[in-house]
Image (cartoon, rainbow, N blue to C red):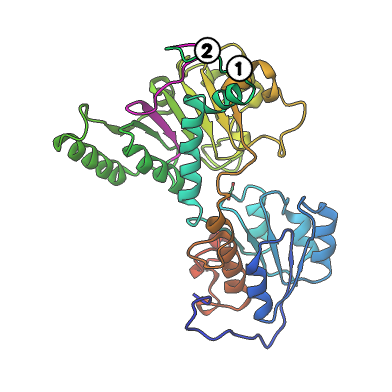
Amino acid sequence: MIFKKDLPEKTMDKKFRVFATCDIGEAIDVLRKRGYEVEVYPHPEAPPKSLILDKVKSGVDGLITTLRDPIDAEVFEAGKGKLKVVAQIAVGFDNINRADANRYKIPFTHTADVLTEATAEFAFFMMGTLARKMWTAEHLTREHQWGYWHPYLPFLGDEVTGKTVAVIGTGRIGLAFIKKSVGFDMNVLCYDPAYENQAFVRTIQEIHDLRHARGLVKDKAWIKYVPFEEALRGADFVSVHVPLLRAGESATPTYHLFNEKTLSLMKSTAYLVNTSRGPVVDEAALALALRENWIAGAALDVYEQEPLPADSPLRDPAIADRCRLMPHFASAARITRLSTDPDKGMAGRCAQGLIDVLEGNYGGDVTKMPYVVNKEGFGK
Ligand code: GLV
């Protein structure tokens, strides 16, 4: 790792030019100290695509992007012969057209792993906030509506401990979510369209068995993989952790995986939590499900369109007590977002991914670079 203190800073013979579509903090200084010429888009909003095209046409070697930037054939064509890498500060990369990147032979990197725990814990907190009605309860206090202590008025929430959660998608973040659910003695219904991690499930079951055997819990919790419909039917909570895959991108697309049909399978007392990607949930269907009480509530961090439009049906005041809306914030913790250490922070990992490609680390073999996503585009 190049940022470790015992290594001297390397100054490049060649000056690489980089355009960053947003500021990623001190990791930009790390690149500049290595001799890179880095231009940072100065506004917090995403730059227009025309500006990204202009920068790429001007001959930058690398682009630092976020999940808000559409990166496709038009961008790769504009950078033909010059653009060498796209380094995305996010684990998700559905904004980058993978087939186009492969066609133009441009590696792109992402920042998996370093945001796993932050995202999983945020999903867990959203679940608790939603079920225990914390937002509504605080409003009650702030708006001077708290007139008495009463056993069940004006409303009650639902416990999380000992309940059954369906974890939809058992990649890194789904598994981290499950680890956190162990402390709350939750039963887990796992579903993953691509891969079943049975070894992980066995380990979690062993921990549940031990907690029970040692008298820490009265009822032994369980975990198992089940088909999607069974997971939805059996769960008190559903937490979504799948990548966004549109039709044609995968044999098991996830676009609108949650729609009128699948939402109607959930219990009327169940809650939905989505920290994955907005288009995995059909928002019109979800708003209907909430209005008509098909389900008890939903907490969302991601949306079909971001930022959430003013006229979104999810903003309907009639469902405000059971619909929590977060601003795509699950990985937004200090160290997770900004540490320059590639083993800790998205910014550090993003810069390292860029450096690996531009400086030809790993003998210049893209397929060996840990943060490159589209390795398949560079095989023999
Ligand atoms: C956030 O949503 C990410 O993909 O990193």
Can the viewer see residue 90? Answer: yes
Residue under the point 34% across and 44% down = 197
Q: Is residue 156 magenta?
A: yes
Q: Is residue 295 above or below residue 28?
A: above
Residue under the point 49% across and 75% down = 1
Main secondary structure along the magenta-highlighted residues: loop
Residue 14: percent from the left, percent from the top? Answer: 70, 85
The amino acid at mark 1 is Gln
Q: How many marks?
A: 2
Give the residues drawn in magenta, as a range: 152-169
Residue, disc 2: 154
Element assignment for label 2: loop
Residue 6: percent from the left, percent from the top? Answer: 47, 83
Residue, disc 1: 145
**Residue 300 in the figure: left or right of residue 22:** left
Q: Is residue 355 above or below residue 128?
A: below
Binning the other alpha carbons within 10 Å of mark 2 as few (below 14), some (14 to 19) or many (20 upward) gives few
Mark before the other along the chain sequence, 2 or 1: 1
Q: Quadrant of residue 227?
A: top left
Residue 45: percent from the left, percent from the top? Answer: 77, 50
Element assignment for label 1: loop
**Residue 364 in the figure: left or right of residue 283:** left
**Residue 211 in the figure: left or right of residue 317:** left
The amino acid at mark 2 is Pro
Q: Quadrant of residue 221?
A: top left
Cβ–Cβ under 8 Å for marks 2 and 1:
yes
Residue 235's label in the rendered image is none
Binning the other alpha carbons within 10 Å of mark 1 as few (below 14), some (14 to 19) or many (20 upward) gives few
Residue 118: percent from the left, percent from the top? Answer: 49, 49
